[in-house]
Image (cartoon, helix red, strand yellow):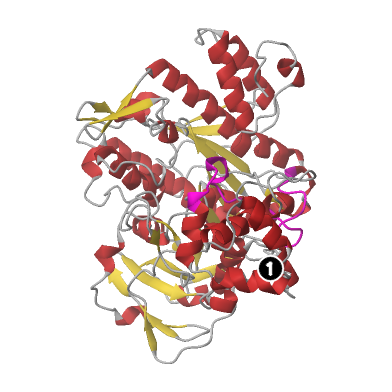
Amino acid sequence: MTRITKSISHVLICIILFGCATNQDNFRVNTDQDTFRKLTDGSVIGYSQNETSLWLGIPYAKPPLNDLRWRSPKALDPWDGIYKATEFSEACTQIGSTFGDPLSVVGSVHGSEDCLYLNIFAPKNIAINEKLPVMFWIHGGSNTIGTSSLYDPSVLASSQRVIVVTINYRLGMFGWFIHPSIKAMSLDPEDKSGNYGTLDQIAALKWVQSNIDQFNGDKNNITIFGESAGGHNAYALMFSPMTTGLFHKVISQSGSTKTSTLDEMINYFDAIESPGNKSSSKEVMNQLLVADKQALNRDEAILLQEGMVDSEIYDYLKSRTKEQIIQTYYNNLDEKDYMHHVINDGFVLPKQGMDFMNTEKLKDIPIILGTNRDEMKLFLAFDPEFTSQKFSMTFIKNQDFYDISSEYGSKGWKVAAVDKPASELVKSGNQRVFGYRFDWDEEPKLLMMDFAKILGAAHAIEIPFVMGGMKLGGLEEYMFDKNNIAAATRLSETMMSYWSEFAYNGDPNRGRDKDQAPWRAWNNEVNENKYVIIDTPPDGGIRMSKKASSYSSLMEELLLDSRIPNDDMRCEFLQKALDANWFVDEKILKSGLCKNVH
């Protein structure tokens, strides 16, 4: 993403992706005495805006600097005086991109390692003894980019009377990284885990448990929700044995259940047994040594690394600047490893990963899980195989190939993130599993670009609808126009109603006002309700679907699809399915249809 040309369409997609209020709107504000609160670590004061009270940039753990880099988050030291919580904190360290933070310089090292802060949004005029449900938002961005300041849940908080907490957490190399030297030099099993970004989220949840009552939040009714990597992290928090009692409901929007093993995260990529990723910690150490001119090439770096004792390696890694670490990592990045998945360390996350069938804890957690119908279009729109860029505009080369590619990729995403886990959760005894598919695709045309065809119901398009802020930082005219804004706003109100009713009662049902179409729980029986389709009335409105898919049914559909003109293209789709970790029947691979597919 760092190589994407910045254009009107790219800025638009960033705006769509993140909701998309910039933190500049909140810099010079006056505090509101009604927002004074006494917390466990000190006093804070925020400000009010329209119907919402806001507290921005409250620290929830010590800055993870110097000896605290690649350590679990540590408790804050209490502060004196009143902390002015009126500005967002810096983003966590990441490569600059319009997707991660529009305020960054693309390609630069952006943000700070001092970034463990959270933000609180609450409706004004809460009764003294009133306790409201808490919704805890985890931002997306492949666990490598993004920041909480990109999201404005003010409308969600004020209109639905919920408390919304948004957080920053360590990203990329600082959030999920484990080298044998770190394990050897650590006494605490949390420090040995490599899951520092996950531990940050857990620390923020613990902060909420200790302090949210001061904001009229109910610590016994907390819903975690997130999109993309945030949905992935929401799943991880479900599985972690460290989160019992910290939250009570989960919403995973376009999440993922894929995890990384310790071997993948540590070992050399060409190890004979249990090879690692090309961006594993040993490979990153090699790259740092070469970049630092201590070795001429990878072979020399391996010899040098293997001759160093753990304390030398650990001190060397800690002494590298954030710029050295991030730039070296990105200069050697294998794009397949761009996403930082949580690690099966056996302590923060189970060694078997996210196995829904064998976790007793998950039986009692209500969950909403869903995807967007055209998830893959966001990514295909920037792929030169599918589109061309001319005059700062995006043009699709072959609409049929584009649509079919998106369709199968998006359906595969839905199987992985919704159909498979929902089926397994219900089979294991969870009766409060609710699936959705978001289908809204009514974007306008702009400068010869038809965004309904380029994006449709692409990845992350649902976020502004869930947050409720249909104003998109002044660029809403590129997403909405006079022909669609009224219907889009009504759909947003419907989604907020479902999401908040779930936060209140663990069942979206008919929404907060009991006037929406019924959203039924997932039922594994044939011809029974599976998931709700979310769309405006002209495209079918809100309705239940009884059709679920599996990898095998998608593979059968792919092989029989008459729209695919030849076997070469069919085999190309099959290879993409394998690359996306579909479980493909071995008989298909051995059939001879696609000889070069593996």
The C terminus - image quarter = top right
From the image, tell me which residue sits under label 1.
182
The N terminus - image quarter = top left
Q: Give the range drawn in magenta.
A: 330-356
Question: Which residue is painted at 58% across and 30% down in the image?
Answer: 412
Is residue 138 among what the camera can see?
Answer: no
Is residue 551 left or right of 514 when viewed as pictured?
right
Is residue 181 among what the camera can see?
Answer: yes
Up-down relation of residue 585 to residue 468 (above or below): above
Up-down relation of residue 65 to residue 478 (above or below): below
* Outermost residue to the front: 296
From the top left corner, tell me how far across and down residue 322 is, in percent.
48, 66
Q: Which one is in front, 361 or 88?
A: 88
Q: Which one is in front, 388 or 284?
A: 284
Question: Which residue is painted at 70% across and 29% down in the image?
Answer: 583
- Which SS does the magenta portion mostly show? loop
Question: Which residue is painted at 63% across and 53% down in the image?
Answer: 283
From the top left corner, tell me how far across and down residue 202 is, in percent.
60, 66
- Estimate how packed mark 1 is, as few (under 14), some (14 to 19) or many (20 or more) residues with alpha carbons within 10 Å: many
Q: What element carries label 1?
A: helix
Please say whether residue 517 is one of the residues in the magenta stretch. Answer: no
From the top left corner, tell me how far across and down residue 199 is, in percent.
62, 65
Question: Which residue is painted at 69% across and 22% down in the image?
Answer: 552
Please say whether residue 342 is one of the residues in the magenta stretch. Answer: yes
Q: Which one is in front, 504 or 247?
A: 247
Is residue 558 left or right of 395 when viewed as pictured?
right
- What's under tag 1, amino acid-wise? Ile
Is residue 408 left or right of 146 when viewed as pictured?
right
